[in-house]
Amino acid sequence: MRIPLILICLFLSKSLLAQHKIRAKFTPKESYEVAILYEIMPDVLNYKTHSKFDDEGRFTMTLDSTFNSAMYRLVYGLPQEVHNFDFIYNGQEDIELAFNTETGVVFIKSEENRIMSDYYSTMAKVGQEIGEAYRNFSTDTIKLMQLFERQKEIQHQFEAQSESLMASEFIRANRRYIPAHFEPLQSYINNVKSHYFDAVDFKNKTLKSSNFFVEHATNFLFGLQG
């Protein structure tokens, strides 16, 4: 039976469109040999593919239609538990990144991962400013409430930006307690702890198939001292 040429072209076209790529540049270039990619499942890491680094510290991986929309872990050295980082692949975009041992990973191309990175770095910065304000200006209620208002605006801004993305699951689950009026430092810390898991859905499949719960719990245990 002959298959019409137009059907063959449509099939090839669909297959090519379903493929995306990860392009990466690692420095220093002499430090890396093989990159291994795993899909993160709720209870296990599922090996997907691997690629050798070239002489310039670069590699390219092709992500075909067998790659699910999910969280992935890229392992770039041994021990694997240390030399890795996670990222989102939504099945709809290419990913380009740069990695350095000193500064970590920067996503050059990927709306999902750039929004996630920007969100966490921006929230970390305002959180640090709040901590410094409590230490240095503990009675300056106006300054502190301005910082809390900015924290609220940042959360709302990134929730809106990520509304149709996988990143939204993480950004919404990371909502922090923000007081409506001034609170002394210890009261504020107590309330942050009491409400720390309010936004977390422990049945959420996307969150379960990531390291979110571990990192969130670790920050609760070691990052909220006071």
Image (cartoon, helix red, strand yellow):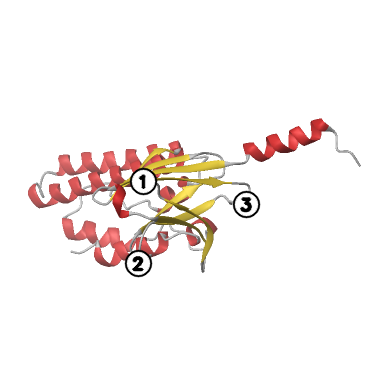
- In primary-sequence order, the first of circles 3 and 1 is 1
How far apart are the alpha carbons under marks 3 and 1? 29 Å
How far apart are the alpha carbons under marks 3 and 2? 27 Å
Q: Tell me if residue 135 comes above or below residue 197 in the rendering.
A: above
Q: Amino acid at mark 1?
A: Asp
**Residue corresponding to mark 2:** 79
Q: Residue 55's mark?
A: 1
Within 10 Å of the Cα at label 2, are there few (<14), some (14-19), or many (20+) other Cα atoms? few
Q: Residue furthest front?
A: 55
**Residue corresponding to mark 3:** 66
**Is label 3 or label 1 in front?**
1
- In primary-sequence order, the first of circles 3 and 2 is 3
- Asked whether the residues under the numbered discs 3 and 1 touch, taking CB atoms below 8 Å apart as contact, a structural biologist would say no
Q: Secondary structure at mark 2?
A: loop
Residue 97, position in %: x, y? 39, 42
Residue 167 appears anywhere in the view: yes
Within 10 Å of the Cα at label 3, are there few (<14), some (14-19), or many (20+) other Cα atoms? few
Residue at point 80% right, 30% down? 6
Residue 12, position in %: x, y? 71, 37
**Is label 3 or label 2 in front?**
2
How far apart are the alpha carbons under marks 2 and 1? 22 Å
- In primary-sequence order, the first of circles 2 and 1 is 1
Residue at point 36% right, 60% down? 77
Is 220 in front, or is 45? 45
Within 10 Å of the Cα at label 1, are there few (<14), some (14-19), or many (20+) other Cα atoms? few
